[in-house]
Image: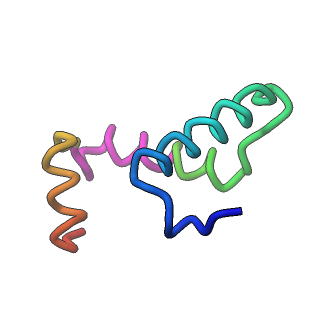
């Protein structure tokens, strides 16, 4: 078996797609952990209370690349 480092970007992305498709087939048997539900509720609360805001995907990628929070 090849090392993942030897795969091209396209091959790596295809591998991820295949894995995601496989995991998605069994999605009804998977439940999110409780902490995830709590995080979503807190995000909704923060938005309702104007303690947060949305940014465009391009702006989010730039912030992540620049190390901003």
Q: Is residue 22 above or below residue 65?
A: above
Locate residue 63, reporting x and y percent.
Answer: 18, 62
Residue 45, quarter of picture: top left
Let me know if residue 44 is in the magenta part: yes
Instruction: Pick whichever, 3 or 68, lies toward us.
Output: 3
Taken as a whole, is the magenta stretch helix, strand or loop? helix
Locate residue 40, reporting x and y percent.
Answer: 52, 44
Instruction: Report the quarter where the N terminus lies.
Output: bottom right
Let me know if residue 35 is in the magenta part: no
Looking at this view, name the residue that lies furthest to the bottom.
67
Q: Is residue 63 above or below residue 20?
A: below
Left or right: where 64 falls relative to 14: left
* Residue displayed at 58% across by 45% down: 15
Instruction: Report the quarter where the C terminus lies.
Output: bottom left
Instruction: Pick whichever, 68 or 3, lies toward us.
Output: 3
Left or right: where 25 falls relative to 35: right
* Residue displayed at 13% across by 49% down: 59
Q: Is residue 64 above or below residue 57?
A: below
Looking at this view, name the residue that lies furthest to the right.
29
Q: What is the total number of numbered labels drawn onto the structure image? A: 0
Residue 22, quarter of picture: top right
* Residue displayed at 86% across by 32% down: 29
Locate residue 23, reporting x and y percent.
Answer: 73, 37
Instruction: Pick whichever, 57 or 50, lies toward us.
Output: 57
Colouring rule applied to residues: rainbow
Magenta-tinted stretch: 41-53
* Residue displayed at 21% across by 41% down: 57
């Amino acid at each position: 078996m090849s090392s993942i480092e030897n795969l091209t970007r396209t091959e790596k992305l295809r591998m991820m797609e295949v894995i995601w498709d496989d995991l998605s087939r069994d999605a009804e048997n998977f439940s999110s952990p409780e902490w995830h539900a709590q995080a979503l509720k807190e995000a909704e609360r923060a938005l309702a209370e104007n303690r947060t805001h949305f940014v465009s995907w391009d702006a989010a990628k730039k912030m992540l690349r620049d190390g901003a929070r």
